[in-house]
Image (spheres, rainbow, N blue to C red):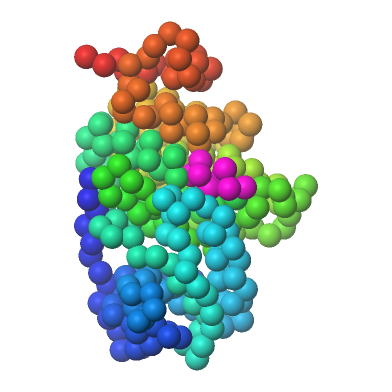
Amino acid sequence: MAIGAAVPPQRTDDPERIGPYAVLERLGHGGAARVFRAESPRTGPVAVKLMHDPNFGLRAVTNEFHFASLVDPQFTAAPVAFGEDVAGAYLVTSLIPRHGPLSRARRGSFPAADLWRIGAAAARAIAAVHEAGVIHCDVKPSNLLAYGNSVRLIDFGISRLIADQPRTTSFVHFSRGWAAPEQLGPHPLTPAVDVFSWGCLMASLAGGSGPFQVGTDEEWVESVRVGEPELTGLPLGLDQLVRAALAADPQARPSAADLAEACDVPQRIVVPGSPRARFARDWDVAMPMAA
């Protein structure tokens, strides 16, 4: 699976240099930052994330560099450096060849085999983040770079350490359409928030829209907290894995590692007593059998 590599056009307000890096082209932009392909004699081609906010930008890239540094680089874009100059605070990461964000994929048109493959790869990336002691808190298509059987999870801008979670917090950041119920209020967060986002991702790729699509922000929040997800286009077995991931109770959700194993295509045959069979039993999943 290759994702189309449409590139936003360079704009006149894009800098020619960011620190020691010469800007080559814009790769993307969002509410918090712009991302460029750049290079320097020391590093060669890299990706440079330039923050919009002049007040909190340096703190944000410092935290993001720390969190990304903890994660196995085969599951993210390895951080290279961070700094601040007249253009603003910036984070430099490795440039991942051929990978494109899942936000550029045509949702609702994936064959079943590709959905299983993406589900496994995305869950492996999330599990690697959790194994590093980090909760990503913003798993969504634009933060997942995919190519073939590889998915990289990037952008640790609102991530947290699992060990540092308070009992309650009023510090709430999330992206509409991908957030778990516990992210919508002053609740402690666990790795289960990223599992919920995985469920939203898979529902969106299969059905063309997320599982909680309603009009206003208030309606969406209410639907995420107490509503039933709308799931269409998912193959038999994967639909029930996604439904388990979207459980309102975070303790009822499977782990990302469990999801990765259950979605792994080479293990599609359910052998009695295997981890896949135990997972199917524990979450009442009707897994497809190989022909």
Where does the image place residue 237, in percent across and percent down from the top left? 37, 22
Q: Is residue 104 above or below residue 266?
A: below
- Classify residue 139 as left or right of residue 180: left
The magenta segment is 126-133
Q: Picture coordinates of residue 37 (x, y %)? A: 33, 74
Q: Residue at x 60, y 66 (%)?
A: 63
**Total numbered labels placed on residues in the image:** 0
Q: Please give the name of the residue rendered at 40% of the width and 43% of the height, measured from the top-left corner.
A: 122
Camera sees residue 186: yes
Left or right relative to 103: residue 291:
left
For residue 174, what is the image quadrant?
Answer: bottom right
- For this orientation, the residue located farthest to the top is 272
Q: Is residue 92 magenta?
A: no
Closer-to-camera residue (275/226): 275
Q: Residue at x 72, y 52 (%)?
A: 164
Q: Is residue 14 left or right of residue 195?
A: left
